[in-house]
Amino acid sequence: MTAQVASAARPLSRSPDFLKLWSGQTVSLFGSYITELALPLTAVLVLHAGAGQMGLLGTARWLPYLLFTLWVGALADRVRRLPLLIGVDIGRAIAMGTIVTLALTGHLTFGLLLVLVFVAMTVVFDVSWYSFVPCVVSREQLIGANSRLQASNSVAQVGGPSLGGLLVQVATAPYALLADAISFVVSAASLLSIRVEEPKPEPEPDTAVRGSLARIREGLSITYRNPFLRAFAGVAGFYNLFDQWILTLFVLYAVRKLGMTGSSIGLVLCVPLTTAIATYLADRVPRP
C-alpha cells in the first residue's frame, strides 16, 4: 500500500516518511560538512596543492551552482523529484568513492580531483530536495518540517568540520572523505524506503513553446520584482563570495604557516557557528 502525505493532525514524529527523509539527510549533511574540511586537506596534504590550485578547487566546487542552478530548477519542476534525488545520491557516492580509491592507491592527480568534484552533481540535489518536502508532509506541517531540517543543517555545520578534522588526524584525509561517500549511500537508502506517492508534474500547455529558458526568465523576473527576494539574493551573493575567498586560503595557511592539525582546524571552523547559535538561543530566552 502506498503511504500518503502525513495529515496535519498527525505529528511529524509519527510520520514515517518524514522521519526517513530527516534522518537520511541529517547523516548526509554531516558527511558534506566533513568534506568541507577533508577535501581541501586532501588537496594540501596528499597533492601538495598551492594557493592557485586551491582557488581552482574552490572554483570546481562552486562553478556548477553558477552554471546549472537555474537549469536544474527548471528541470526539477518537470520531473518526479524522488528518483532524481536517489540517482544524484548514488552518483555523489560514486564520485566521492572514486576520489578516496584513487588517493589511497596513489593515482589521484589534481586534474582528476577537479573533474570529480565538478561532476559530483551536488547542485542537483540541493536545488531539488527542499521542494520534495511538500510531497512528504502536508502544507500545515511545512514550517515544522523545514525547521527540523534546518536544525539538522545547523548542527552539522558545527559538528561536521570538527568531526572531519578529527577523522583527518586519526585516519588521514582520504578516509575522512570516505565518510561522505557512505553518508550518500545512507541518504539514498533512506529515500528508497520512502513510500509516499509523488504526483507526476503536469506539463503546462505552452511548455514546448516556452522551454526551460522562458521558465528561467520568469523565475528571475519574479525574484527581481520582489524586494525581499532581491535583497536575499544580493546578500547571499556578497556573503558567499567573501566567505569562500577566506575559506579557500584558510586551510592552506593553517597547515603551511601555522602548522595546525586537522582537528585544530576543525575546531577553529566550528567556533563562529557555535557562538552564533548560542547568541540566537540566548536572545530567545525570556528576560525577567
Image: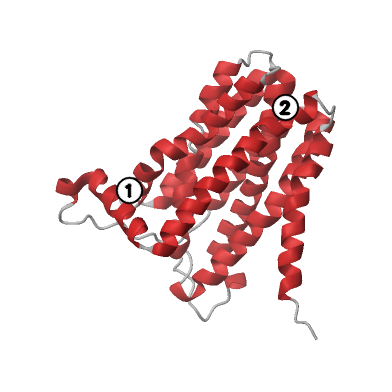
SS at circle 2: helix
Residue drawn at x 58%, y 76% as measured from the top left: 11
* Left or right of 68 in this view: 89: right
Label 1 to label 2: alpha-carbon separation: 37 Å
Name the residue nearer the viewer: 14 or 139: 139
Q: Give residue 32's position: percent from left, percent from top.
A: 63, 42
Residue drawn at x 61%, y 64% as measured from the top left: 148
Q: Give residue 109's position: percent from left, percent from top.
A: 61, 15
SS at circle 1: helix
Residue drawn at x 75%, y 44% as measured from the top left: 269
Q: Which residue is mark 2?
A: 252
Name the residue nearer the viewer: 3 or 172: 172
- Residue that sits furthest to the bottom in the current view: 288
Q: Earlier in the sequence, mark 1 or mark 2?
A: 1
Q: Which residue is mark 1?
A: 74
Query: How many numbered marks, from 0 up?
Result: 2
* Left or right of 20 in this view: 232: left
Confirm or deny contact between disc 1 and disc 2 (CB under 8 A).
Answer: no
Please tell me whether residue 265 is drawn above or below residue 193 in the rendered image: above
Residue drawn at x 81%, y 44% as measured from the top left: 267
Specify whether residue 179 is in view.
no
The C terminus appears in which quarter of the rendering?
bottom right
Q: Give residue 217's position: percent from left, percent from top.
A: 27, 49
What residue type is disc 2 on? Leu
Q: Give residue 30's position: percent from left, percent from top.
A: 67, 47
Specify whether residue 11 is in view.
yes
Name the residue nearer the viewer: 247 or 34: 247
Label 2: how many Cα within 10 Å (few below 14, some 14–19, many 20+): many
What residue type is disc 1 on? Ala
Displayed quadrant of residue 247:
top right
* Left or right of 75 in this view: 272: right
Q: Nearer the viewer, mark 1 or mark 2?
A: 2
